[in-house]
Image (tube, rainbow, N blue to C red):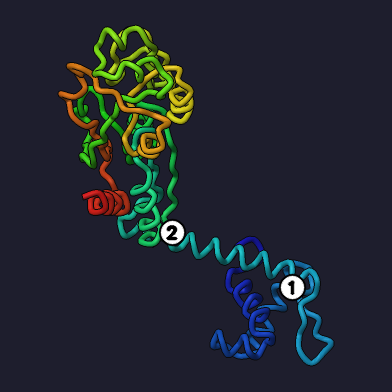
Amino acid sequence: MIGNFTLDQLRVLTTIAETGSFSAAGRRLGRAQSAISQAVATLEDTQGVTLFDRSGFRPVLTDVGRVLVAQARSVLASAARFEAMASSTREGIEAELAVAIDPLVPTAAFIDSLHALRAEFPFLPVSFSTEGLGGAERRLRSGDAALAFCILLPSVPDDTAALPLLGIDLVPVVSPAHPLAKLNRPVTAGDLDEHIQLVLSDPAAPDGPNYGIIGTRAWRFVDLARRLDFLLAGLGWCRMPEHLIARHLVDGRLVALTIEDDPAAATGPLMIYAAHMRNRALGRAGSWLLRELQARLG
């Protein structure tokens, strides 16, 4: 019972609207026509409205009846989702899966995996947030996210379970109009120190550790797209994920730099992890998503 009506009464109402008669609704629901009529009469009485005009051969929805049929369908759909979510929880599926992602993480494979997750767990509420550098890990630690796709610098914390997903090559690049592009030779640390480096920073700790800084002249950004705008405008140089600048290298809007004795070259690709807190195990859906991403990226 919901207030003064039941879900069964709403189901009878919508079935009559779909089948066109009380008798047809009774056949679909496996009930006598008299039971259908009684359910409608009780609903009309408790709500104080007339749902059907019975003056003709067939009952016809009144104006208010048509409006309430639409509302009844919405209520029944919500009730079905409620039951499905409760059933999923009994089967070990999370009540909700909250995911956070760092700006350097490639999105194409992740988007495909989210589509697959929706198909596998259609009633699972998924919340998703994109964060500045370091933001996904913070959401993980605060409990606002169950799963984070992020970089973990300088190393993986002991309280974090982290699965390496893929390595990202960061390419030092600059606009062809920039003075560094006109040297026509490998650049040195001294060359770079004379120019602005566009650095992606953690908005919560803008002066904290950053990856691959060379020199002392740094402009700091929390937004990857805005940093790319400044890079294309020739206002500095930076390291960019290869997948984000490939087309700009092809069309000549950016050129790659070769850096002598580049300290970042020794560390190799920047690793992207799928991480969760060790004291908060993933449910079935989160574990399924990790396996899906592994298969897609493997």
Q: Mark 1 against mark 2, which lies toward the viewer?
A: 2
In which quadrant will I find the N terminus? Answer: bottom right
Question: Toward which corner of the image does residue 145 lie, by quadrant?
Answer: top left
Q: Position of residue 249 (x, y in %)?
A: 36, 34
Q: Residue at x 43, y 21 (%)?
A: 177
Q: Residue at x 43, y 29 (%)?
A: 224
User: Would residue 111 be visible to someone looking at this image?
Assistant: yes
Q: Earlier in the sequence, mark 1 or mark 2?
A: 1
User: Would residue 287 be visible to someone looking at this image?
Assistant: no
In this rendered view, identify the residue nearer to me: 230 or 131: 230
Q: Position of residue 194 (x, y in %)?
A: 35, 7
Q: Residue at x 63, y 71 (%)?
A: 10
Tell me which amino acid carries mark 2. Phe
Q: Position of residue 265 (x, y in %)?
A: 19, 24
In this rendered view, identify the residue nearer to me: 172 or 226: 172
**Image position of 55 with respect to 187: above or below:** below
**Image position of 139 with respect to 291: above or below:** above
Query: Residue tagged by mark 2?
Result: 123
**Secondary structure of the residue carrying numbered label 2:** loop
Question: Toward which corner of the image does residue 183 lie, by quadrant?
Answer: top left
Mark 1–mark 2 CB contact (< 8 Å):
no
**Image position of 264 with respect to 76: above or below:** above
Q: Which mark is residue 44?
A: 1
**Secondary structure of the residue carrying numbered label 1:** helix
Q: Residue at x 33, y 55 (%)?
A: 93
Tell me which amino acid carries mark 1. Glu
